[in-house]
Amino acid sequence: MEKLTRILAGEDRRDFTADVKLGLVDADRGLRRRAALAAGRIGDAAAVPALVPLLQDPEPEVRQMTAFALGLIGDALAVDPLLAALKDPEPVVRGRAAEALGQIGEARAAPAVAQMVVAALPPKAPLVTVRGDDPASMTDPWLEPRLGVFALARLKDARSAQAALLSGGKPRFDWWAATWTAMRLESPALRPVLLAGVASTDPLSRAYGARGLGALKDPADLDALLPLLRDRDETVVVNALRAVALLGEARAVPAVSALLRSPSSALRVEALKALAVLPPDRGLRERVVAEVGSPEPWVRAAALQALARMEREEFALVLANLDPDPAWFVRAGLAGALAIAGDEASQARLLAMLKDDDVRVLPYVLEALRQARGSDSVDTLRRHLDHPDFAVRMAAADQLAALKATGLSEMAATSYARARGDVEMDARLSLVPLLALQKDARAAALLREIAAGDTARPVRERAARELRALGEIPPAPGPEPIGRPALDYREALAPYEATAGTSVFTPRVFLYLKQGRIEIHLNVVEAPLMSATFLDLARSGFFDGLTFHRVVPGFVIQGGDPRGDGNGGPGFALRDEIGERPYGRGVVGMALSGKDTGGSQLFITLAPAPHLDGRYTVFGWVASGMEVADKVRPGDVIEKVEAWTGR
């Protein structure tokens, strides 16, 4: 335990210390495994030569964690050893090696990964049907081929994916993981996988197959998608709506508009979003206008944007008789609708909205002005680089960067000086790419200053990346100073340190909402820092009264922001604790605005989300109450959070 706490302290500082190095060669296999994970999380390429020999460790658990850690570091020097590990005698090691190659993004690895996937299948099986696998499990028997096909999605090699997913032009799998991979690759060559997916008895396969066909944007696929708009599974219908919206075919409008009568507000919102991009049908005007008066704010916001696209005159008439909405995010949605309308009257209203009493609306207004006015919005955006609110300054910098605006070095420098006093680092993070666009001596000097001296390592690292892109050799970011009380790792890991007379237990929290209770078990072993911090915040009442500000049906719900707009946090940043646990349904992760920027914003996945694996910290999972999570809507309040630690 003493050695472990020293390893974790080096991980905490993002410093590849002697204690971490010694841990890699310790006689205890558990310490070697944990030191390998620490090296991966630290992310220093100098650790690669020390890690590679562990791919030959006698213990499979050490080899698999070493492969995972090399993927986190992402250095190309690890590619050849990882290719060799694809032939490891242990399936889990082969799977983790494939996953790491996908993380590194080495294209030449794709054929070998495809061969590994095929070799992992039952021999001579004409179709491999998988049901009941656990996408949130690290020990699921289908882990090896699942990690392999996901790696192919990250490697973006459609030819190798064909070799793995098709045999003689026909799908090898009836499995959601194969369909998800085909969806992500967006290749017409994988259409047979997607068509088989939409015809599957598995709802996840139907959902991902629908999204994949939509991404191909072939009108011929509409006939396969329309029946899914009547599917019994809501997630399938949501994904089918998004797919037909991408196809843009007028004959989809009747089936989509029928869902405006659905009792599910989630389906009505998705139908309105689809109607906003499908060819307009004037006959739907009254039904859409009726939704502008919905009691649910997120429905009102979607209806305004649909109306702006469908019927400009009716939109203008509704606006003329519409009082400012009491929900700030509906007013934010109105900004998006005005950007869609784009006429002079809409632009004038957007400019007036810059005086909204709630600063959370302003970032959306600035984005809408950039979309509606293009380069004519630069002066307005420049002025907001000096706004008192950090999120407004961040939005101004982001929109100016999107416009590739130049001549802003001095204003950006002034904004950065102001941002140094922010509790959050987000405005400074956004200013770095804007400075890189300026390409003058003043901006370059400030980038060097930021890379060497910003108080937050994520900001220093972003500045260093921009300097490298400009052809400069940046200073090393250095270890991360601890801007919060250092975690007592011995205490944090105590629940899992079995001693005589005590039992091992899992700390947990209970979220109470109007829909019911969600019980979350915390991942103390792999994410001790986030677990301990979350428990402390819960005990202090931090989460009581906060909202779920982001809800994406079929994907995620997110809350825990004291601002309620996705830009707030607890006043400090937490380093990532990326681990091997995958994002299946009901996994609890920490939202980020960049590496090592976690705080208090938890999210819960409503369906498997493999693109989050290895990128966001898993610090818990829902033990009970997923039916409650499925019912959460934007703005729903976390009434209270209770913590239990076994004491």
Image (spheres, rainbow, N blue to C red):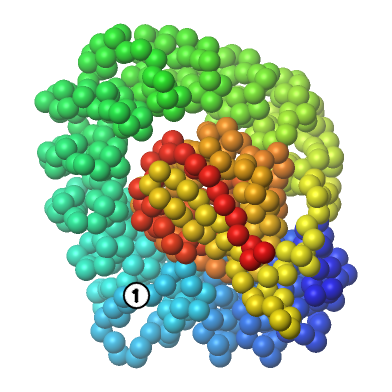
What's under tag 1, amino acid-wise? Gly
- Residue at point 58%, 28% (across, down): 395
What residue would you read off at disc 1?
A: 132
Decide if residue 612 is in sight here: no
Judge left or right: residue 382 versus residue 236.
right
Residue at the limit of the structure toward the right, as seen here: 18
Q: In the rendered image of this protein, does residue 401 appear above or below residue 464?
A: above
- Residue at point 30%, 42% (across, down): 266
Q: What secondary structure is marked by label 1? A: loop
Where is the C terminus found, in terms of image quarters?
A: bottom right
Judge left or right: residue 22 versus residue 338.
right
Q: Quadrant of residue 233?
A: bottom left
Residue 550: percent from the left, percent from the top?
Answer: 46, 41
Question: Which residue is at the front of the view, 102 or 10?
Answer: 10
Q: In the rendered image of this protein, does residue 624 appear above or below residue 470?
A: below
> How many neighbours does mark 1 have within 10 angstroms: few (below 14), some (14-19), or many (20 or more)?
few
Question: Which residue is at the front of the view, 177 or 562?
Answer: 562
Decide if residue 12 is in sight here: yes
Residue 547: percent from the left, percent from the top?
Answer: 49, 38
Where is the N terminus found, in terms of image quarters?
A: bottom right
Residue 294: percent from the left, percent from the top?
Answer: 27, 28
Residue 83: percent from the left, percent from the top?
Answer: 59, 78
Judge left or right: residue 603 versus residue 523.
left
Judge left or right: residue 227 versus residue 50.
left
Counting the numbered discs, the total is 1
- Residue at point 30%, 80% (across, down): 128
Q: In the rendered image of this protein, does residue 217 appear above or below residue 422?
A: below
- Residue at point 46%, 24% (across, down): 328
Q: In the rendered image of this protein, does residue 256 appear above or below residue 229?
A: above
Q: Quadrant of residue 64?
A: bottom right
